[in-house]
Amino acid sequence: MSLSIEMGWIMFKLKPSNKNLEEMLRLPKVSNYDYLLTTDKDLVEDDKINIVFKEAQTHKINRLLDLIVNGEEVFLVGHNERGQKRVEVRSIQYVETFGDDVYLVMKDYRLLTKNKLYQLEKELNDIDFIRVSKSHLVNIGKIRYIKPAINSRIELIMNNDDIVEVKRTYLKDFKETLKI
């Protein structure tokens, strides 16, 4: 069993259907959704959160969707052999530790940070990061697939193709958070 999570656990639907807009807004096809995006105020649904916009404002809606899914812009500082860099939290795939070193892992590079994992867990908990092992925090919005593994574990295939394992101790909280 594999579960695709394209935009975190907040789902959007566009009405009326418009392939170009769906591609520009990077909306996956879903049947169960929380937010309705529409360019026609007559298509508003009572039981959903409705966002009515003009097609000319698509770039602003794209930014709004990013904020809804990923939260406010929060930055962390890390460094590697090239120097120090400030990164947006929403660009972090996951955080991992090796001994006393804590790394922020992005799509194609990693940065060493001075923060401790428990500090980052506290700070990032409200921004859709969840602890999945003693040494890993993952960005829920960067999970591409969830795949069962042996011994009651789950493997997370991240958007950068790295695999992060959810350990048994953290499995219940992980499933509750993602409602799976």
Image: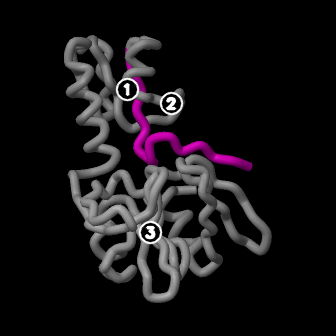
The secondary structure that most of the magenta stretch takes on is loop
N-terminal of the pair, mark 2 or mark 3, is: 2
Q: Is residue 56 above or below residue 176?
A: above
Q: Which residue is mark 3?
A: 95
Q: Is residue 140 visible?
A: no
N-terminal of the pair, mark 1 or mark 3, is: 1
Secondary structure at badge 1 equals loop
Q: Quadrant of the C terminus?
A: bottom right
Q: Mark on residue 69?
A: none
Q: Is residue 53 above or below residue 178?
A: above
Kind of residue at disc 2: Pro
Q: Residues within 10 Å of mark 3 (few under 14, many from 20)?
A: many
Kind of residue at disc 3: Val
Q: Is residue 83 above or below residue 100?
A: above
Is label 1 in contact with label 2 (beta carbons under 8 Å)?
Answer: no
Q: Is residue 46 visible?
A: yes
